[in-house]
Amino acid sequence: MGYVAVKGGTAAIEESLKRIRYERVKQGKVLDIDMIESGMRGLIDQVMSESSLYGETLAAVAVKQAEGNPEEAVFLLRAYRSTLPRKHYSRTVNSGEMLVERRISASFKDIPGGQILGASTDYSHRLLDFELISETEESVKEWLEEFERAGEERFERAEEAAFMTRLPKVLDYLRKEGLIADCPDDPREPDDVTRRSLTFPASRSQKLQILTRGQTGAVTSMAYAVIRGYGNLHPTVGELRVGNLPIYVNNPLDSSGSEEDAYFIGDIKVTEVEMLMPSMVEKEKGRKELEFAFGYGLCYGQNETKAIAMSILDKSLERSDNSIPTQNEEFVLFHIDSVESTGFISHLKMPHYVTFQAKLNDVRKTKQTQTLAAEEV
């Protein structure tokens, strides 16, 4: 069999790009960016989180260009992000200031402010809704009017609406009882993995950044492995909250950094999880006691599974036992990044003619040597 070099170039690539567009529009229909942004909330939130760029419209454009492929959309959005100038740094955000729209605890039934179920598929039957096939804009408008009217009546009857309010943190009550350790402020400037490559041993700020921008499925799988296969006791969600965090930047004309002169530039929707982790701690004379530690997860949008998985991995990586894969920070942090992993896998499609031919020649020489040896015998 003969081997022929594949010939191609600019013309072939241009035709390939045209074919991509043809496959996207060949049915004569065009997805509207507004429809993607409003109707694919989960995908938009996932792409923003993995791209480290909060921009719903930009994420919708990336999803459209990638034809719904989240890995390609993240690649596109990260590439765009790298072209943007960084003009300001926001002030430190206090998650206690979150305007909460969903907030639950699996650890306590009664929590100050109450459990707020909000929007979630957790309580649905997970059955296909075939009525969506015939859904129209008119029917949606009618439903929205009825829903909003009923909501106004509920708020009028309530003395204080829990929706979109600032609520105390559940774990603060455990800290007051001394049941979990306090979190002292770290005055050091956080590392920025988007500007400097990840180094080992990784700082906690690096770990949290890589986890929050990690591929959602990979982060979830790693966290599942922590619980299932590597001896961790069952973790419990201390508190999960979804809501908007206000973002402020300092007055550029005031070097003092006064909070009173800061500018409010908008808010971002995030999911935050504080996960309680029971663990046996060895005390004096070999005595063991049960104590609670906690892991932390926060990511853009309503992305609850990922935030929970992130909090589990946060605590797992703290143990730094390289003999256990899910505690080995290099193993975890290098393999959950969607652009890095997808890029390396995809590069296997690129030409490897020279290296493959070299390997093939080695195999031929080995076969020839074995044949000659057999003939001499």
Image: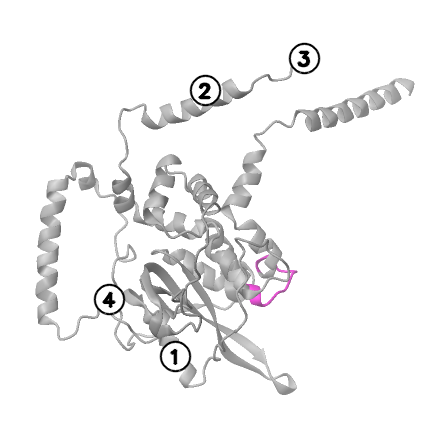
Dot 3 or dot 2, earlier in sequence? 3
What's the mark number on residue 172? 1
Alpha-carbon span between mark 3 and mark 1: 72 Å
Image: magenta residue range:
317-326
* Mark toward the viewer: 3 or 1: 1
Q: Position of residue 360 (x, y in %)?
A: 72, 24
Q: Between 320 and 95, which is closer to the camera in this rendering?
A: 95
Amino acid under disc 4: Met
Q: Secondary structure at mark 3?
A: loop
**Residue 298 position within the rendered picture, expressed as x and y whole percent measured from the top left:** 42, 62
Instruction: Work out whether mark 4 precedes mark 2 in sequence or the reverse, and give the earlier one.
Output: 2
Most foreground residue, 317 or 264: 264
User: Is 51 drawn above or below residue 323 in the view shown?
Assistant: above
The mark that comes first in sequence, 3 or 4, is: 3
For label 4, the residue is 164
Point out the tag, 1 or 2, that comes first from the N-terminus.
2
- In the image, what residue occupies the spot 12% across and 61% down? 151
Report the residue marked by disc 2: 15
Is 319 magenta? The answer is yes
For label 3, the residue is 2
Which comes sooner in the sequence, label 3 or label 1?
3
For the C terminus, give its image quadrant.
top right
Query: CA gap, disc 1 to disc 2?
Result: 60 Å
Query: Above or below — where is 331 with respect to 189?
Result: above
Give the structural element (helix, strand or loop) at label 4: loop
Q: Amino acid at mark 2?
A: Glu
Residue type at numbered disc 3: Gly
Which quarter shows the N terminus? top right
Q: Nearer the viewer, mark 3 or mark 2?
A: 2
Label 2 CA crowd tier, 10 Å (few <14, some 14–19, many 20+): few
